[in-house]
Image: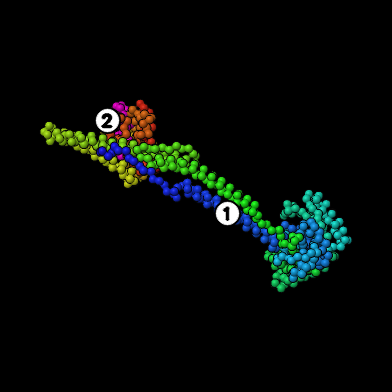
């Protein structure tokens, strides 16, 4: 006893530095920031170097004008004899040194008379029959420059004739469709194009003669015939069916057209090869002969990058410290509150609306429930002691009186002691039922039963007590509801409610048992015209050892466990029990059980 009054001293354990949430958050953020800055700098440097090397190596990404102009020259000239003036004009506009060589690196022409060592790799290969799509946008899918027309170049007379036709067709299509464009191909052949929105399944040429422009003219007939022969010879070697190529050089066939397209591309290159300049290597360098203008990090640039990286790191650390401190502060408050003695039931303020706030609210709720459970535990221990002490004191008193010769051991005394023992046994049985329900070990044995029989059985069992109390006990069942349940436990449920109603109903009052079937459940009601229960006491009706009489008198009260047992047994059947009451008018207990 002497040690219970001493205040308990709790030592607050110091959290190791390496396990501190703030330190770990800071370390993680610093590591992420360092890695991010380093990775960003490395990626930027590698990306820049890669772009420069790509430009130095095989692509002329920035000087597409040079490449496009030279490809166009090669497409309309059979050799590079007169390309020097073109190179000089391009060099003046771009400020670059331009050199063309053969495949064996023999110089064909240069934009400057001064010769310098050429780079090991050419900037590009100028070949109108195999253009580079990365350098020449808008090229054909076969990589043949459209300006390479060779034997298909029309005469002036043919161009004039086709132009007259094209103008008429263009005017007609503009009038019928409202959308058409007239262009001229490098060979001199006019072309009328319609947008994709017009060229659908419903388009019909209303006499404009659009197909007339697809008819070869005399200049095109011979080379086109030769081209078809070359294509079909190629397909025959591959054991593929023959095709007919039109003046638009498009393969129209069902099935796999790839072999025919390959043969067509090869035949066109063979046919155009005598009319275009041979492939040449293109070298684009600086005026001093360097392959490209190199990019080097100066000391100022290096210092600037390091300063920016340090600033980013400093800002990251500062923001992390602020955020981490704000994050850890409520957590520390929660930890301090959790370490307090249980009796204090500490609360923490909820200052945020995030996860920490939710945690604080949950902690406060847990503390409140713990306080309530602790109060209920203390009250239950006191109630159990009180309920058991009264019958035990009565039995002990009478036994001591018999032992001392004060009272005679007659039948009346035995009956009184037996009544007290039965009351004690009833309290113990009720406590055992509640203990089994709390432990989840309450067993029920369901079987089909008629609710009408259940109510009649309970009413018959309590009829004598009702007559003694001057209370009218009636039953009323709508229809013939059935359910599956433990008949013994359900009689205990309804019996406890009837017993409680009879106890609180004055003479000349009524207690009514009602039942009816709903869609998916059966409702049993026990209604009385008793004194009623105040509204503030309704939430505690099903608490253990709770009584409306605060004096705990047994003249009108039982053990205080009957309604608690009703709730547990109803829940064991998967049902619910509720209560409504009006002071001075009566009370209705409603039990809903699944049907």
- Asked if residue 185 lies left or right of residue 258, the reply is right
| Magenta-drawn stretch contains 148 | no
Residue nearest the observer in this picture, 318 or 93: 318
Question: Is 217 in front, or is 185?
Answer: 185
Disc 1 residue crowd, few under 14, some 14–19, many 20+, Cα 10 Å: few
Give the residues drawn in magenta, as a range.
492-511
x and y percentages locating residue 45 in the rendered image: 63, 56
Which residue is the site of mark 1? 38
Magenta region, main secondary structure: helix
Q: Residue at x 70, y 72 (%)?
A: 238
Cα distance, mark 2 to mark 1?
Answer: 81 Å
Image quadrant of residue 462?
A: top left
Question: For residue 575, which quarter of the picture?
Answer: top left
For mark 1, give the secondary structure. Answer: helix
Q: Which of disc 1 and disc 2 is earlier in sequence?
A: 1
Q: Which mark is residue 104?
A: none
The residue lying toward the viewer, choosing from 506 and 231, is 231
**Residue identifier under label 2:** 553
- Across and down, in percent, residue 574 comes to 38, 43
388 or 500, which is in the foreground? Answer: 388
Residue 141 locus on image (x, y percent): 72, 61
* Disc nearest the viewer among 2 and 1: 1
In the displayed structure, would residue 202 be above or below residue 326?
below
Q: Is residue 57 visible?
A: yes
Local secondary structure at mark 2: loop
Q: Quadrant of the N terminus?
A: top left
Looking at the image, residue 97 sits to the left or right of residue 22; the answer is right
Residue 396 at x, y percent in the picture: 18, 36
């Amino acid at each position: 006893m002497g040690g219970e009054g001493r205040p308990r001293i709790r030592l607050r354990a110091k959290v190791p530095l390496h396990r501190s949430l703030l330190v770990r958050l800071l370390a993680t953020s610093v590591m992420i920031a360092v890695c991010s800055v380093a990775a960003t700098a490395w990626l930027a440097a590698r990306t820049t170097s890669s772009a420069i090397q790509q430009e130095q190596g095989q692509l002329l990404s920035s000087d597409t004008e040079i490449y496009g102009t030279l490809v166009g020259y090669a497409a309309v000239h059979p050799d590079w004899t007169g390309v020097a003036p073109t190179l000089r004009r391009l060099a003046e506009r771009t400020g670059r040194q331009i050199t063309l060589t053969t495949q064996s690196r023999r110089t064909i022409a240069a934009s400057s008379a001064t010769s310098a060592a050429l780079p090991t790799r050419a900037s590009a290969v100028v070949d109108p029959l195999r253009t580079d799509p990365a350098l020449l946008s808008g090229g054909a899918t076969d990589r043949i420059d459209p300006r390479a027309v060779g034997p298909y170049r029309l005469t002036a007379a043919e161009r004039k004739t086709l132009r007259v036709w094209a103008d008429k067709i263009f005017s007609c299509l503009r009038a019928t469709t409202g959308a058409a464009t007239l262009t001229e191909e490098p060979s001199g052949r006019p072309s009328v194009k319609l947008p994709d929105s017009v060229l659908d399944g419903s388009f019909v040429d209303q006499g404009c003669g659009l197909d007339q422009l697809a008819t070869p003219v005399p200049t095109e007939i011979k080379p086109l015939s030769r081209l078809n022969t070359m294509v079909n010879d190629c397909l025959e070697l591959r054991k593929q069916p023959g095709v007919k190529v039109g003046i638009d050089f498009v393969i129209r066939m069902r099935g796999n057209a790839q072999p025919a397209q390959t043969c067509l591309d090869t035949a066109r290159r063979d046919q155009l090869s005598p009319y275009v300049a041979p492939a040449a290597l293109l070298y684009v360098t600086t005026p001093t002969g360097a392959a490209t203008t190199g990019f080097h990090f100066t000391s100022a640039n290096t210092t600037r990058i390091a300063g920016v990286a340090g600033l980013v790191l400093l800002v990251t650390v500062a923001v992390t410290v602020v955020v981490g401190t704000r994050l850890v502060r409520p957590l520390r408050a929660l930890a301090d509150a959790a370490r307090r003695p249980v009796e204090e039931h500490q609360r923490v303020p909820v200052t945020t609306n995030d996860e920490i706030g939710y945690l604080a609210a949950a902690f406060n709720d847990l503390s409140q429930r713990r306080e309530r459970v602790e109060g209920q535990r203390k009250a239950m221990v006191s109630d159990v002691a009180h309920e058991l002490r009264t019958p035990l004191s009565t039995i002990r008193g009478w036994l001591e009186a018999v032992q001392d010769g004060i009272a005679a051991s007659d039948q009346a005394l035995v009956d009184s002691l037996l009544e007290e023992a039965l009351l004690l046994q009833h309290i113990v049985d009720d406590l055992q039922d509640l203990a089994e329900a709390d432990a989840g070990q309450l067993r029920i044995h369901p079987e089909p039963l008629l609710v009408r029989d259940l109510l009649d059985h309970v009413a018959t069992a309590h009829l004598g007590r009702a007559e003694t109390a001057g209370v009218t006990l009636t039953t009323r069942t709508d229809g013939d509801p059935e359910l599956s349940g433990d008949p013994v436990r359900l009689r205990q449920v309804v019996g406890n409610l009837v017993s409680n109603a009879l106890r609180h109903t004055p003479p000349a009052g009524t207690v009514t048992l009602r039942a009816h079937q709903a869609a998916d459940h059966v409702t049993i009601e026990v209604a009385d015209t008793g004194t009623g229960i105040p509204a503030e006491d309704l939430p505690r009706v099903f608490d253990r050892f709770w009584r409306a009489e605060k004096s705990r008198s047994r003249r009108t009260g039982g053990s205080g466990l009957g309604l608690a047992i009703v709730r547990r047994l109803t829940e064991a059947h998967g049902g619910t029990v509720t209560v409504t009451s009006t002071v001075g008018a009566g009370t209705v207990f409603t039990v809903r059980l699944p049907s």
